Amino acid sequence: MVIALIVTPQGFPLAYEVLAGNTQDSTTLKGFLGKIEKQYGKAERIWLMDQGIPTEAVLEQMRHSDPPVKYLVGTPKGRLSRLEKQLLEKPWQQARSGVEVKLLAEQDELYVLAQSADRVHKERAMRRRQLKWLWARLKKLRVMKLKREELLMKLGAAKQKAPSAWRLVDIEVDKQQAAFSYQLNKDKLRRQRRREGRYLLRTNLTESDPAKLWGLYLQLVHVEEAFKNLKGDLAIRPIFHQSEQRIEAHILVAFLAYCVQITLTERLRCLAPGLSARSVLEKFAAMQMIDVHLPTTDGREIILTRTTQPEPELKLLLDKLKLELPAQPPPKITTAQATKATAL
């Protein structure tokens, strides 16, 4: 199945849709545009999307709608090759600490080339780690005594494990023997280095403040985090239900749990900014509610519903979040056993 989640700029969920598992991402947007407008009315919305969601036809339709539908979408790095010369002439502007952008207006769109220093270091470290592993693996394979078919299988496994590094190495396999040669493609490596930590965005917004454009794009992080929480912390997968109604009920419960989790996250941001929702839920797991059953001499049974007393650390957390445990309820008395005893 495919789950589509709609959130506010702050990450609060508004709605979700469940689609068939063979639904392509690029086919979902057009229907959602009309459905959201019909359900919530016309508003000054900005659609933030990854590169695989909109097609060129849908983006053109969004630009020429009345009024135009605003969007900010990630763009494949391949398009960067076409715009690279024009972008080289543009100066870098500071969007925020560690992030620089270049703006390029083209026709009725604005292209935003963003460069994050943190992302540069992260992607560069990942590339070096992959390349180091691949180079060592190729060196070992070259001296192994293998059949040609075995060599091809091992090369294929190496490609699958280090795909990014594989693209930077020119490998030539002998057509008859179990032998190959390899060398680093320095031109590809230089191009890769130039593009590490860079994102190419496109938008039809008239906003020219790079900080605001970058801030908008970062909202996609909320969506990615939402799906990560649904799949991980809230364990929406795997689903083994057989009927469609049970599947939808499972997802509804997970969605409601996510609403609670996001509310907790927002509360923590104000009252305890050093804590994450995951860590708080782990601490609250120590709290338990139990029913204490006390039989009486006359055949009745007293049921006391009680919660465990919080440890000092947990009590401090409750005070920090301005939460109070509910008062202990009065005991319940059942007469089932007494009635049974009288009947005998």
Image (tube, helix red, strand yellow):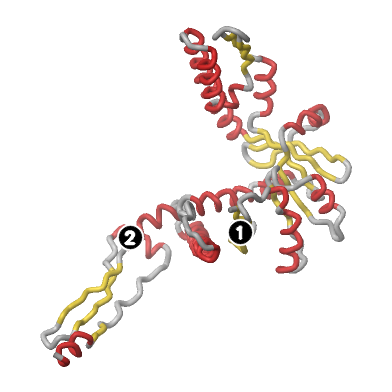
The picture quadrant where one finds residue 92 is: top right
Residue type of the residue flagged with mark 1? Val
Say whether disc 2 or disc 1 marks the residue closer to the N-terminus: 1
Q: Secondary structure at mark 1?
A: strand
| SS class, disc 2 | helix
Q: Amino acid at mark 2?
A: Leu
Camera-side residue of 50 and 265: 50
Q: Label 1 neighbourhood size at 10 Å, few (<14), some (14-19), many (20+)? A: few
- Is 113 placed left or right of 312 in the picture? right
Residue 263 seen from this side: no
> Would residue 113 be seen by someone viewing this image from the given angle?
yes
Could you tell me residue 157's position as x and y percent?
52, 24
> Percent x, y for residue 342?
15, 92
Would you say the residues marked 2 and 1 are in contact, meaning their CB atoms lie under 8 Å apart? Answer: no
In the picture shown, does residue 339 fall above or below 121?
A: below
Return the mark for residue 18. 1
Viewed as shown, does residue 105 lie left or right of 129?
right
Q: Residue at x 64, y 47 (%)?
A: 218
Residue marked by disc 2: 314
